[in-house]
Image (cartoon, grey):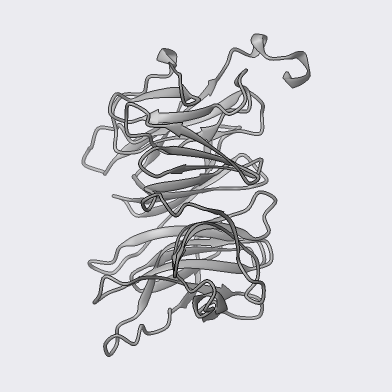
Amino acid sequence: MLPFEGVIVNTKTDPLQDKQWVLTRDPATVQLLDFLRMEVEWKFPLSLQPGEEVFDLAFNPHNGLLYVSTQRGLRLFHPGSGQQVQEVLLPESGFSEGDRFFAVALAIDVSGNALLAVNTFQTDFEGWLFMETQGGHRIFPHPAQEDPQLFISQLRFPQVRPGGKGFFAYGTGWGLRGLLALGGAREAPQVVTAFDEEPDPFWMHVDRFSERILIRHSGLTDWKQGQVRSLGFPPFAPGAPAYCTACPQEGTWLLANGSVGRIVAFRGQSEAPLPQHRMGGGAWLQVTALREQGYYIVQTDSYSSGGAGFQGQLLKVAYPARQHLPASRVR
């Protein structure tokens, strides 16, 4: 078990290593957690202005910097030392004088391209911007926002595709609602699957190791390389999932049932509670699959508050039992 400080705001798992960047508040920090060694590799505090909030973070493989989004813009840090090297302001919204966009979610791929889901201070506007970090920081509307065929006005849950190049996101626009695949600014987005009859999703999760996605609309939708399978309605509000590569049945996801603090293996018609992994309640309960087959990280904020702030914990678990795995999958 690994304790760590702070209330989790957002996380990003390294696509190539079993490590995760964590953005917290109370106290405001950025931490790099090593899941294999079960240690906090490094941590640095964030000096925020009064009332300044943090929203998301992303590591830029192109320039080696860590980006933290706040109401002021994007803060760029040198990983490890925590030294802030730059602050990037987003464009003004144009709705009123001095009103600027701020990024509520961002994703950066290996080529240095970035997707930003944005809001504004003075309106309820939800939009998105594209950013190129090669040789600077050029932030602009993507051409698809003005394409009469697509007119993608909103883009939510931007995530880097497995392999590190390009993005998946959920977009809505003129006669469009569905899963998008995006590349560079000069590449037209692909509508890989339309969900015209579904309401806007609560969340979307891209598996670390495959082109597999779980989308929570009113129910759960399992997407695999263009094939869609409805998992129906789980009897609880599922939290951040992980695809279960070690489970005996294909198409099984590990879901966090935060109301009772339990991890559940879910495949649609059936669910299998894992009582040995009961974590207790908490606002944040997340499962992360490791490259080490059959092992997962359970992350919870079911902590007690103290004078110095809050403390959460990580637990490394095995599921199913390693001796029950096929011989070819045991390392």
Task: Classify 6 as above or below 131.
Answer: above
Q: Residue at x 47, y 52 (%)?
A: 195
**Above/below status of 129 relative to 64:** below
- Out of 78 and 273, give the one closest to the viewer: 273
Q: Residue 227: x, y in percent?
A: 62, 41
Q: Which of 230 and 294 is in front in this view?
A: 230
Q: Position of residue 156 (x, y in %)?
A: 44, 59
Residue at position x 34%, y 38% from top?
284
Task: Name the residue furthest bottom.
Answer: 97
Q: Where is residue 298 in the image (x, y as percent from the top left)?
A: 46, 30
Residue 80 visible, this orientation: no
Which residue is found at the position 52% from the left and 71% from the top?
Answer: 150
**Between 168 and 14, the one nearer to me in the picture:** 168
**Marker count (numbered):** 0
Q: Which image quarter: residue 309? A: top left
Residue 246 position, x and y percent, is 63, 23
Position above or below: 183 against 161: below
Pick whichever, 276 or 52, lies toward us.
276
Residue at the extreme top: 323
Q: For this view, does 164 lie left or right of residue 204?
A: right
